Amino acid sequence: MAVLLLIDDDRGLLQLLAEFLTRQGYAMHTADGGREGLRAFYTHHPDLIVMDVSMPEKDGWETLKAIRDMSNVPVIMLTARTDEADVLHGFSLGADDYVNKPFSFAQLLARINAVLNRLGQSPSDEGKLCAGALEVNLSQRRVTLNGAVVALTPTEFKLLVALMQRAGEVLTPEELVRDVWGPQYANEIGYVRRYIWHLRQKLEPDLEHPQYIHNDRGFGYRFSASGE
Amino acid sequence: MSAAPLVESVSAALTKARRILAVVQWALPVSLSALSTGYEFTEHQIMRGQPLSPNLSMEILLFGLIGPSVVAAVIFYIRQLLVAQARTQAELVEMNRQLEEKVLSRTEALEQRNRDLASANAELLKLDQLKSEFVALVSHELRAPLTTLNGALELALQAENAMPGNARNTLHIMAAESKRLTDFIQTILDLSRIEAGKLTINPGPVAVRPLLQQAVDVVLAQSGRQIEWAICGDLPPVWADELLLEQVVRNLLRNADKYSPPGRPITLSACQVEADKIRISVRDHGPGISLELRERLFERFVRGLNGENAPPGWGLGLFLGRKLMEAQNGTIGVESPAWPARDAPGADFFVLTPIADMPEDV
């Protein structure tokens, strides 16, 4: 049974979330604020922490920094702030995911399960795909090229991940459509060419000689893991 | 450049000419008279004491008196013309002076007004900024308690089968209203972000059919409203922000669902309408939209129906939709009636969005 720690100064929310997640089969610990949260973290060694950003005294960012000094335990931040700068700040401090208030409990549960499953499947790489200067952080859904963030749409992100997860293999447009959009769109392969072209515009340093996404004419597309 | 120096120099020249003419007017006729009389006496060799013949008298009268008088009259006339000219000139100079004074005073007034307007504008911008900050703060402060409220309802509804019918209904109503409030706050926050120039656009290619399907799944999953699909084949992806475009389509679908009578389908279509644009349209069988309302429908707080029988809403969805489409280089519009039926003419809400272009030879 996974152990979760909830840190939030809103006691009402804390109580309700703990009850909801207990019903879903998690062992729950709660903490009313950052300081108490750190104490609970030392005591209970949770598998995952869900923590609010806005808390009096020691806020979520400070608490996250303190946790990251000691542990790589996954942390999902809750916040009522929606500015992109806030989200990026959270990720830069090592948050694994970010959920905006108001959220539904079911949505938060899905995020918790996704983070725990990901770690269960590949604890060593911490949910990252790399190819040369290109790095994809699966939990943060963030792509960087030479350290700079590349702005991809959600579908472009899925397409890139589909290619990278089977790096070295030639994937037909039908396979990519199935992976990215779902089997019901398997016949609509016309999308793929345009998506790949625009993805290359965002990723490839030299469009004449692509490093990452190669086109095997008549067959499909192949991602080069070496980035060469 | 002012014309006053030129006018003044012309005026001075005319005054000088008038003074010269005042002398010439008398000097020239007298001189002419003396010369011509002398000439007549010399020509006819008239000696002193000799009587004048009638012909000679006539000649002397004609050349010595009448001729110079005519010259005097012509010069007099020219002088009068010059006097009149000088008077007009003086009036012109005066008018110019007055005009320049007026221009100067108006320019000063205009500059003062510009300064006042700039100051009022700065004040308004400051107030608008304060308003946006206030709205963001209030919305932000509402989000946290709403999370708790929504969560409590969600938790309670997990055990709805064990509740009495009345309690269950009450909880469902509370959940629906809480969701409505959540959506409203989200809309207000989106608008304040757009108005503060903080909306981040993440453009890329967007496959239309999956996007529409996703929007339908989210919006109409519970209402069970039937959809008639009319999607053209081989649609290229559009160039938009995937999440924002879906947000606009979801909003149009919600409106169509709200305003359509039960049991009538919504028609969802998408086709290429120009060389570089795709038109996505949501057609309902509702009461339609009058011409007068169509012109204002995408403004803030304007609603299709008002009064007690109107579906719930704040009149912000279409305004937000317009802002979101403009931010993505697209447009939003409406045509009504959408159908020939008089009792339910319906409305056809559409967005026009550019195609994700790429060269043909790759």
Image (cartoon, coloured by chain):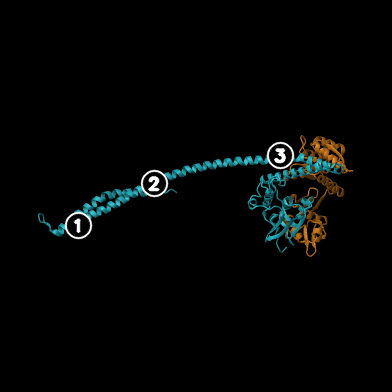
Q: Amino acid at mark 1?
A: Leu
Determine which quarter of the picture holds residue B64: bottom left
Q: Which residue is mark 3?
A: B138
Q: Is A85 or B128 nearer to us in this picture?
A: B128
Q: Which residue is mark 2?
A: B93
Q: Position of residue A114 (x, y in %)?
A: 83, 48
Q: Residues within 10 Å of mark 1 (few under 14, many from 20)?
A: some
Please report whichever mark, 3 or 1, sits nearer to the chain's N-terminal start.
1
Q: Which residue is mark 1?
A: B62
The subunit carrying tag 3 is: B
Q: Amino acid at mark 2?
A: Val
Determine which quarter of the picture holds residue A219: bottom right
Say which residue appears at 66% left-offset and 47% top-offset. Answer: B302
Residue lying furthest bottom in this view?
A218
Q: Residues within 10 Å of mark 2 (few under 14, many from 20)?
A: some
Pointer 3 and pointer 2: residues touching (CB < 8 Å)?
A: no
Q: Amino acid at mark 3?
A: Val
The subunit carrying tag 1 is: B
Q: Is B266 or B74 nearer to us in this picture?
A: B266
Q: Are marks 3 and 1 on the same chain?
A: yes
Say which residue appears at 25% left-offset and 54% top-offset. Answer: B71
Query: Which one of the lettered chains is coloured orange?
Result: A
Marks 3 and 1 sit apart, C-alpha to C-alpha, by 109 Å
Chain B is shown in which shade? cyan
Mark 2 residue element: helix
Q: Position of residue A94 (x, y in %)?
A: 79, 44
